[in-house]
Amino acid sequence: MLRKYGYTNGALTGFILLLWISVFFIGGIYGAYSWAILKLVLPILGALGLMINLIMLIIYIVKKQKSAKLFINIVVNIMLIFPILMTMNITPFAYPNTIERAHPSITVSWPLTSETVVGWGGNDVKENLPHAVWASERWAYDLVMEPYSINSESNEDYGIWNKEIYSPVSGIVIAVSNNEADITPGTEDFKSIEGNYVYIKIKETGTYLLLNHLKKGSVSVEVGNTVEPGDFIGRVGNSGSSSEPHLHIHHQRQDPTKVIHPVLAEGLPLFFHDIDGNSMPNKDTFIKPHPLLK
């Protein structure tokens, strides 16, 4: 049976099953790597294999020959390609981790003092589409303020631009970036995905809080600094891969300075106290933060 199916096809099918098992049942960093392989690597291999096998199929048709193994090859290549539907969000599918399974979760202070709108956030893929589909950003947030989504090319026209950011947690600053230029809204002239940032190792859990897209030259902390909730750390900008000024924030297990790629980390639940409403606010929620501790 295996000889008819093909040893290579058997190995590929087994590898695909192993990846899905890792994602659904093993989780952790193994699940994060498996998810990235499924969504980013296998579709490329499948597309190359499908092209080769379709060319062979044409040759077989011209020669009026049949091959069951060739048909199986094509089916396996389609299996490899299938996750591209999730990668392109044609079939949105959240990384299959749950709040109940992912530990530790943290509840932190709101990082802004003015009324804020959750651009993307929450547990549901519909409410948090750009983030929930990746393991590292499973419970990430993009925060904006009125006015937003106004299609202006000027950063100054957006409500959250230059707003002060305060540390949501107690911890140690492990990395900062402060020199990347803020880009024009709606363009793709960024140098890095995260832009300027502050990364904090959380004292309570030993996990990491990431705050991205800060304004060039605004970061006020340095590596090694100890921060407490309410300490000023920088201002909201539009650096990195960003469609408009906003603050990106998420919680993950791995040290972000040591991961090979930002998506290759295990995202963890992030909740907020001192706000009105749900402690894990969803998209389009208006947040009126309570006064910060400092």
Image (spheres, rainbow, N blue to C red):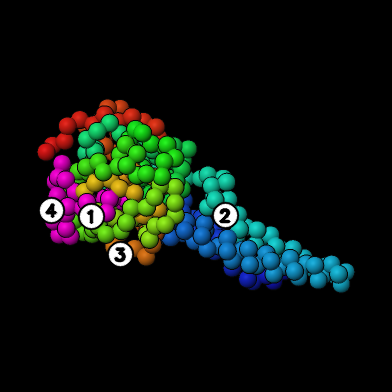
What is the spatial separation of the Cα atoms under label 2 and label 4, in whole angstroms?
Answer: 42 Å
What is the spatial separation of the Cα atoms under label 1 and label 4, in whole angstroms?
Answer: 20 Å
Q: Residue furthest right?
A: 64
In the image, 185 versus 100, the foreground residue is 185
193 shown above or below 95? below
- Give me the disc on residue 217: 1
Q: Secondary structure at mark 2?
A: helix
Q: Secondary structure at mark 4?
A: strand
Looking at the image, residue 224 sits to the left or right of residue 55; the answer is left
- Give me the disc on residue 226: 4
**Comparing labels 1 and 3, the label whose residue is closer to the camera:** 1
Q: Position of residue 73 (x, y in %)?
A: 69, 65
- Mark 2 crowd level (few <14, some 14–19, many ≥20, 10 Å Cα): some
Q: Badges 4 and 3: C-beta atoms under 8 Å apart?
A: no
Q: Position of residue 182 (x, y in %)?
A: 33, 53
Q: Position of residue 24 (x, y in %)?
A: 46, 51
What is the spatial separation of the Cα atoms under label 4 and label 3, in whole angstroms?
Answer: 20 Å
- Mark 2: amino acid: Ile
Write down the region rendered in magenta. 205-233
Q: Secondary structure at mark 1?
A: loop
- Give the residue at x 63% y 63%: 47
Q: Earlier in the sequence, mark 2 or mark 1?
A: 2
User: Where does label 3 land, which residue?
Assistant: 258
Location of residue 127 by image quarter: top left
